[in-house]
Each structure stands twice: as C-alpha cells, then as structure tokens.
Image (spheres, helix red, strand yellow):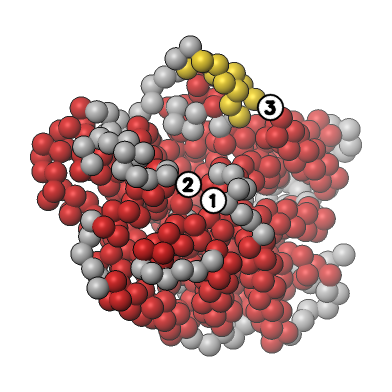
Amino acid sequence: MRQLDLVVIVVYLIGIAWIGLRKAGKQKSAKDYFVGEGHMPWWTVSFSVVATETSVLTVISVPGGAYSGQGFGNVELALGYVIGRVVVATVLIPLYKRGGFVSAYQYLGDRFGLKLQGLASVTFVFTRLLAEGVRLFASAIPIKLLLDEFGVHASYRVIIIVLTLITVVYTYLGGIKAVIWTDAIQMGLYLGGAILAVAVLSAHVGGAGYARAWDAGRFTLFDTDFNLAHILTSPFALPTAIIGGAIFAMASHGSDQLIVQRVLATRTLREGQKAMIASGVFVVIQFAAFSLVGALLWSYNQGKSFAELGLSSSDNLYPEFILNGLPVVVSGLLVAGILGAAMGSLSSALNSMSNSTVADIIHSFFRSTPSEDALLRLARWTTLVWATLMAVFACAFSTSTGNVYLTGLTIAGYTYGALLGAFLLGRLVTRANEVDSVVAFLVTIGVMTYIVRVVKIDVTTGGTTVSQPIAAQWLVPIGVVITLAVGGVLSLFHRAPAADGGSADGAEPGTGPDQLTATAGRN
C-alpha cells in the first residue's frame, strides 16, 4: 500500500512545478522576475511570507515541543511576531513601496550611499546562503526517515540535489510569481495536514484526552517565570517572547530581503501592509494547529517518553504518526506537505538572493543602464549560481554537525541587529552619513560575533547550574542598540549632511518608478 503514498508524492512534485510555471507566465523584465511588476494579490503574498519562514523543522519540531512540555509556547512567540509585523507595516513598508524599490537595501543606498547598500546586500546573501544551506540539510533529515519507511533508501546528498533541482526549475523560469503561487499552495497543504491530524487525533482521544493534556500543562500559553537569567536565556519567557520577539520580527520581516521582496510584489501600499499583518495572524494559527497536534499526541500516546515510544528525538514524533497513525494516501499527502515546506523556503531564498545580487551588488557597478533582456538573463543565471552553492553547502553538512535548527537560528543573530539598526539609524539619526553607517554596521557584526560565540549566562534549574547562550530574540535588540550608539556618536564629530533631494534628512526616498535601474548611473 505504500506504493500509493509514493504515487501521491511524485504527482505532487510534478504538479507543483507545473502549477508554478503555469501561474508565472512569461517574464518580460527583471522587475517582473523579482516583484511580479507589483501585481500579486495580497492574500497570496501573505501565504508566501508564512511559507517562506516555515521550514520542515517548524512543521515537525513544534508538535514535538508541545508534547515534551513547551505547551503552546510557540503561539506565545507568534504573538510577539505579530506586534513586530504591525510596526514593519506601519514604518518600513511605506518607505519601500513609495520608493518604487525591488530591494529593501535600495533604501540604504538612497539614504547613505552605495557602499552601505552593497555591504548590507553582501551580508544578506551570505547570511542567507549559510542559513538556508543549514535548513536545506535539516529538511533532508526527516525526509530521509520518511522515505526509508516507504522502502526508498536515498542518501542526504541525493535528497538535497533532487529537492534543489525540482525547486530551481520553476524558480528559474517563473520568478517571484511562481514562487508566491507555489508557496501559497504548499502552505495550504502542510497546514491542512495539521488540521487533518487534529481531527484524527480528536476522534481517538475524545474530550477526556483534551482534559488530560490540559491538566498536564500541554496547553500552557504563557511562561511567567520572571527570573532575570531565565528571561535572558529562554525563548519562551514572556518578556522574551513578546518584546524580544517583536523586535526580532522587525528585523526578519523589515530588513531581510527574503521577506521584504514578497511584500514589494503587492499592488499597493495598503495591500502590502495587509499582507504583512495577515501573515502574522496566519503564523499564530499555524503554531496553534501544530501545538495542538503535539498536545493531542501526548494523550494519544498516554504521556509516554520518546524513549518508551522508540523514538530517538522529539522531531520523530509527528513523522512517526503520519506514517503509522494515518490512512494510506492521507499519509502520502502529509509527507508531500513536508516536502512543500522545504521547497517553499528554498525557492523563496533563491529568488531573493538573486534579486539582491542583481539590484544591490552587480547593478551598482554598471555605469550605464543595462537592457531589460540583459538584466533578466542575469537574474536567472544568479538564481542557478546560488542554487548550486546552496546545494553544495548543504551537502557538506553531516549528522554530527549538531543541532541544525539552533545553528540556523544563531546565524541570524550575527547580522539581524546590524541590518535593522542600519535602517533605524537612517530614520532616527539625521546627522549620520555613509561613513558613520558603514563603521557602525561593521562594529555591530564584530561585537555580535563575540556575543553569540562567547557570552554565556549561568542558569540554575533544580539545583543544577548550566551556562546558556543569550536567547536569539535578544540578539537583535542588542545589535540595534550597538548600531545606533556607534552611528550616533560618530555623527557628532562632523557637520550634518546637506539635504540634496535625497534622504539625508530622513525624507521619503526614491524618485522613479523603477529603482532597479535608478541606481545605475551613481558613483
């Protein structure tokens, strides 16, 4: 009967590529390739934002975390993320949409100059290469376990290459339109799978199962331990989740081209703001659904430990239920949903990295405006280059590398504070010039590297003291403060830059309808 599941998966992989290309149509320009000429419906963009930030590990880790005692802590995190997205929708999206940008970092070019724009873009693409390479490898781990159950024994390398090849087909040819439409479908599939799993589990455990999970704390939403060491190290402590989570979301959704690019594909400023805020609501629903799966699995398995269930880790919990607790074909659909989560984040990363490479890095070196055909060819070739590099990087990992999820989260801690800090420096410190911003940016990355790799806090739990790193949500505000402090102090040592029609005084940037070509003639 497993053959039917395999048929479902193969049909899905072929179908998603075909749908992506069908929806994309023919690309006419680089702007069409990167932001769909700003004609994408807000709800598809919102779904795409959610799918972009949802990796395979989110799909399988949240149920395992709820099962093992985190309760609905991920929903608490999502509430902080909603607050951050509201700020982004209000403060930053108007800058990007009114400026006619195709890249978030073009605002930095308008405000400070091409040096910071290029530096921010280089930081983004290499951070994204590392983070997405980790996520791509991490995606291969559960997929390999699932395929082994189906009798298909493939190495991590083969899985990575196949996923990359299928994804790059519609990303290369269809651009952002293909990415957004396939993301929307993939989100619907894995979220629908979670809802289906909840329905099946509810039928098994009934009302009594809900009551047992409630009494055992599997529905706990807020972590109200206000011990300072706990707040600084636990991602689920209430102040960390709400305050730190809001600032983290401002960085990840306001200064990371991976997300900003999707919002720039909407028709109007208002639709872009709706897409951003709605994505936060959908993430809350998504985390609630996967957390509920974990709580119900706890009742379904009568609270047994992972060892008693024969599982090596919490990440095996949901895949094991998909394979052994659901009917044939249904399990195939849910496995396809896990594949969809992997492909959604990968396609989004490839297109945004290509976008930033062309619009921010390569384009800055042209002294004359390239033709649209040349820019489109360049966009597609850079997509292939990044796909190849990402696959090579992912294949270099091994199962002994460590916790790949934490590795990916830590990578963001190096740079998110500097990126968000640069945007806020441009808006809040009108005296700051290009030299101030570049120095502040580099100093922040250096200091954050030290904090991420060296700084630990002693936390005492149950009489045992262990050293824990600072929670990822606090890394961003620390980086922002450093950037603003360094840039602000440096700005006091020179005269304020003259207002020349740019944004040195904090005015709205951008003057032309297509900022992809507006920077071509700059020095």
Rendered position, 211 above or below 3? above
N-terminal-most mark, 3 or 1: 1
- Check disc 2 and report its element: helix, strand or loop: helix
Q: In this rendering, does residue 131 appear at all?
A: yes
Quadrant holding the C terminus: bottom right
Given this view, does label 3 or label 1 mark the residue nearer the observer?
Answer: 3
Task: From the image, tell me which residue sits under label 1.
Answer: 253
- Determine which quarter of the picture holds residue 121: bottom right
Task: From the image, tell me which residue sits under label 3.
Answer: 455
**Residue occupying the far top of the picture:** 463
Tag 3 and tag 1, C-beta contact below 8 Å: no
Task: From the image, tell me which residue sits under label 2.
Answer: 85
Residue at x 75%, y 57% (from the top left corner): 122
Circle 2 packing at 10 Å, graded few (<14), some (14-19), many (20+), is many
Tag 1 and tag 2, C-beta contact below 8 Å: yes
- Could you tell me the amino acid type at mark 2? Arg
Whole-percent x and y of residue 34?
A: 59, 72
Residue at x 63%, y 56% (from the top left corner): 397
- Could you tell me the amino acid type at mark 3? Val
Circle 3 packing at 10 Å, graded few (<14), some (14-19), many (20+), is few
Q: CA distance from mark 3 to mark 1?
A: 26 Å
Circle 1 packing at 10 Å, graded few (<14), some (14-19), many (20+), is many
Residue 407 relative to residue 113: left or right: left
N-terminal-most mark, 2 or 3: 2
